Image: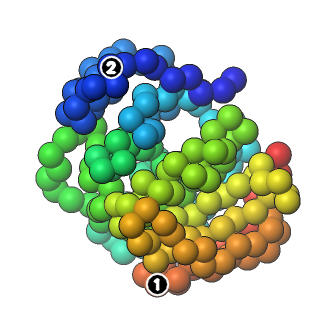
Amino acid sequence: MSALTVSQDPEQSWDDLVRFWEEMEWPEGSKVEIIEGIVTVSPAPAYRHNVIAARIQRRLYSAIPDDWEIFQTLAIAVPSRLGMLIPDLMVAPVHDHTESETHIPAGLAELVVEVTSKSNARHDRVSKPAAYAAAGIPLYLLVDAWATDGPTVTLYGEPKDDVYRPLKSVKFGEPIELPPPFDLVIDTAEFPEA
C-alpha cells in the first residue's frame, strides 16, 4: 500500500495546517505527516523496515547521554518548509517543556534516521532531508533498501540552507561510523535486505 495525500485548502496558514493535522481522526496505526504543505497518510512500516530501525536504535542507546532519548513516533515541526515530519528514529535531548504535546521543533534533534519504504523513498531521499537540513539538524542517516544501485546507508551532515553534504555512503554489509557526539559504528550487515 502506498501513501495517500489529503486535500486541504492551499491558502491555509501554517497554524491552520497544524491544527488540521492535530485534530483530524486518522486511521489507527498510520503515519500522518505534513510534507511540503501536504498532509500525507502512510501505512505502518513493514517488518524489515522495523527490524532495521530497531537494530539502529539498539546501537544508539550505547552512545547517547542519559539526558537524551531516541524517539520513534514523535513529530518534528519545520514551519519554514511546511513540514510536520515523523522520522523513523530521532535522537534529541529531553526537554521538560515544549510548546505542544504533539510535536517538538526540529532544531532540537541531533540525529534523524529514515528507513525507506518502497512507497515513500522519494520523500526520504528529497523532501525530508531538505526540511531536516533547513532546520539545522546536524546529522541525517538514510537507510535506503530500495536504492537503484542496491541497498545503501548514507550519512549526511553539515547542513546549509536546505542541503546536506554527504559524509559517507556504504552498501549493506559494510560498517558506517557516526561522528561525535555519537562516536558509533553501525554494522549494516545486521540489516535484512528487501
Indicate which disc, 2 or 1, sits on the residue closer to the N terminus: 2
Determine whether the residue tagged by mark 1 lies in a helix, strand or loop.
loop
Residue 17 position, x and y percent, is 28, 29
Q: Vertically, is 68 above or below 10? A: below
Determine whether the residue tagged by mark 2 lies in a helix, strand or loop.
loop
Q: Vertically, is 86 above or below 65? A: above
- Mark 2, Cα crowd under 10 Å, few <14 / some 14-19 / many 20+, is few
**Residue at position x 44%, y 72% in the image:** 159
**Residue at position x 51%, y 57% in the image:** 129
**Residue at position x 73%, y 76% in the image:** 175
Residue 181 position, x and y percent, is 43, 81
The dot on residue 4 is none
Q: Vertically, is 33 above or below 154? A: above
Q: Quadrant of residue 11?
A: top left
* Residue under numbered circle 1: 180
Where the N terminus falls, by quadrant? top right
Relative to the observer, which residue lies in front, 80 or 151? 80
